[in-house]
Image (spheres, rainbow, N blue to C red):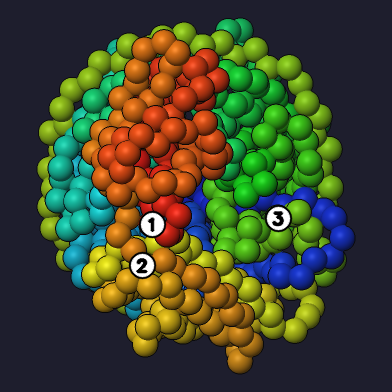
Amino acid sequence: MHGFGFRIGVLLYALALTVLGFGLAAEAQGSWSSLYSGSAMEAFNGAVATADGGYIACGWTYSSGAGSYDGLLIRTGPSGNVLWQRTYGGPGGDGISKIFPLEDGGYLAVGYTDSFGAGQQDAWVLRLDGAGSILWQRTYGGPGDDWGGLCTPAGDGGFVLAGYTEPSGGGQEQQDVWVFKIDADGHVVWQKTFGSSAGECANDILRMGDGFLIPGQSWVNQDSYFGWLIKLDASGSVLWQRRYDGGSFDFTLNGVTPLATGGFVGIGVTYEGGGSSNGWVGRLDDSGAFVWQKTLRTEKADYFYDAVGMPDGGCVLAGFNYPYPSEPNNADVWAVKVDGSGNLLWQGNFGQGGWDITDNVSLTNDGGVLAAGRLAIGGTPHAWLIKTPADGAIDSSCTFAAMAAATFGTASVTVSDLNLATADGIVLEGNTSIVAADSSIPRVYLCASAGACTVSCTVSAPHSAAPTAQAAFSAKAAPQNCTGLATFAWDFGDGGTSTLPTPTHTYATAGQYTWTLTATSDGVSSTKTGTIAVVNPPVVTSMTKAGSPFRILVRGSNLQSGMRVYIGDTEWTNVARTSDSLLKMKGGASLKAAVPKGASKSFRFVNPDGGEITQPWGW
């Protein structure tokens, strides 16, 4: 969910939703779509896949709950069938904008509330168990209007949230960007604000390496704005900040997403006067400079609000468009897939004549795409989920899908340095007493591909582990045309077992072990096997560069003869072992090019007996 679009939408019907991208191709197994429609109106702000092949969607509802509108969670099976649903709220307006599955089977929900807290609207975080019951909840805010509905895991058990803070009685021109980190118990670790004489808000947040990328926008008034991107380190200090300006037209940077092949893309909107707008996508390097940029336009007013990187190195861009100016209330979801160079692969529109919109997409366990948002029927919005394969093909029974006709244009957004002022945040943390309640919003089946239940799964398992050390395993199941969540049965090869999707296991003695995982849904199973070498790993105590020609000296212990060395996924074969404690990586200019100055690379050292260690290093 993105700050500016969300804020406008939640006040007018909650424009902030999550819906997906798909294109039109041949019918494909595993696509489905469902509405979740109560007595009034509701919408999803986001949805993510869970390890067992199901999904959990978050948003808001007027149909049930304690207040004007309440936060909504719906847990579904692999085909969108409801497993449980709950509302969360008080006497005011409350919603949930992000949901994160956790390793213990519970969830972290991030949202907004004006039922409780210190001011007009506060950020709101809930820690839930696997059934949606509240373990703890906290609000974050001051006396004004504070929104922190953007969130990313910090990598250490905590989370970093972003949004805006606005003084009491102020307006958008007084907003500043607000970023804060919480620990695993929801307590504030640090918080920062970034601002100028203009108004600013964050539109997204993404963890990148050991820091965070935050795209957003500034506006001098309601009709003049530009985009920007800030890179923070792990403590919230600014590493760099860039301004993206459309020159003669306005521009917003609405999101960033990493690519499987490295780097990241930004997505946004160019506003070129007279109500005309075009979707924008650009690939950026590690300093925020453009590698390439393009606009995509139809005969409509076009908007991109999110993107998700795909396993093949491309990405799906999602937003909406509507005929301008003839039918401003007839928006459809608009989804486009491009490859890593920005070339168009497929595109589609999805809707049926109402205000059907999206500003978020997510990846499914089988490499497909999940959409969650809203579909309007008779002027009333209803929560909407769609699941499609990676090629965007959706079953022909889904009559709301149609071809789109976007063409590429040349973009001319320019990059310059930005100097937003940084200050420590002063908003307060508080406890709340919002309650969870069961709800009964019915599911309305729309369409699905035909076929028998099938199950596939992916496994992440270590190649090696030291005796008595914990080895971490993880699995994700992808049931197709099934209703039951997948169950997991691990056999670690030494008599140990587990039924968790992400177990750890300790091997007591050295040896070679074969592990097996079986994932089962509706009586259908998929099995994966692999081996793990339980040995003492190599130890790397230091890595240093040496003079001319360029070399890297690796010092440690248990550096065995025949050790293989990898930089990222590429093996580096020009290696000389001097002793059990010294290894020399050679190559001169070619090695220097593989490990450029200022870039941290991942090095993997693998002994012949299977023991290995991964070490980051840069110079």
> Where is residue 551 shown, x and y percent of the image?
41, 21
Please give the name of the residue rendered at 47% of the width and 25% of the height, measured from the top-left corner.
586
Which secondary structure, mark 2? Answer: strand
In 3D space, how far apart are the residues under numbered discs 3 and 2 (Cα atoms)? 37 Å
Tally the marks. Answer: 3
First in sequence: mark 1 or mark 2?
Answer: 2
Which residue is the site of mark 1?
A: 611
Secondary structure under the numbered disc 1 in the rendered image: loop
Task: Answer above or below: position of 481 versus 361.
Answer: below
Crowding at label 2, few (<14), some or many (≥20) Cα neighbours within 10 Å?
many
- Pick the residue in front: 304 or 165: 304
The three-letter amino acid code for the residue at tag 3 is: Ala
Which quadrant would the C terminus be assigned to in this image?
A: top left
> Sequence order check: which comes first, mark 3 or mark 2?
3
Residue 534 marker = 2
Give the label, 3 or 2, closer to the camera: 2
Crowd band around label 3 with a 10 angstrom C-alpha radius: few (<14), some (14–19), many (20+): many
Tell whether 69 sits left or right of 18.
left
Which tag is nearer the camera, tag 1 or tag 3?
1
Q: Residue at x 24, y 70 (%)?
A: 468
Residue 100: which quarter of the image?
A: bottom left
Which amino acid, mark 2? Val
> Mark 3 sits on what residue?
390
Give x and y (percent) for residue 18.
54, 52
Q: Is residue 527 visible?
A: yes
Percent x, y of residue 485? 52, 81
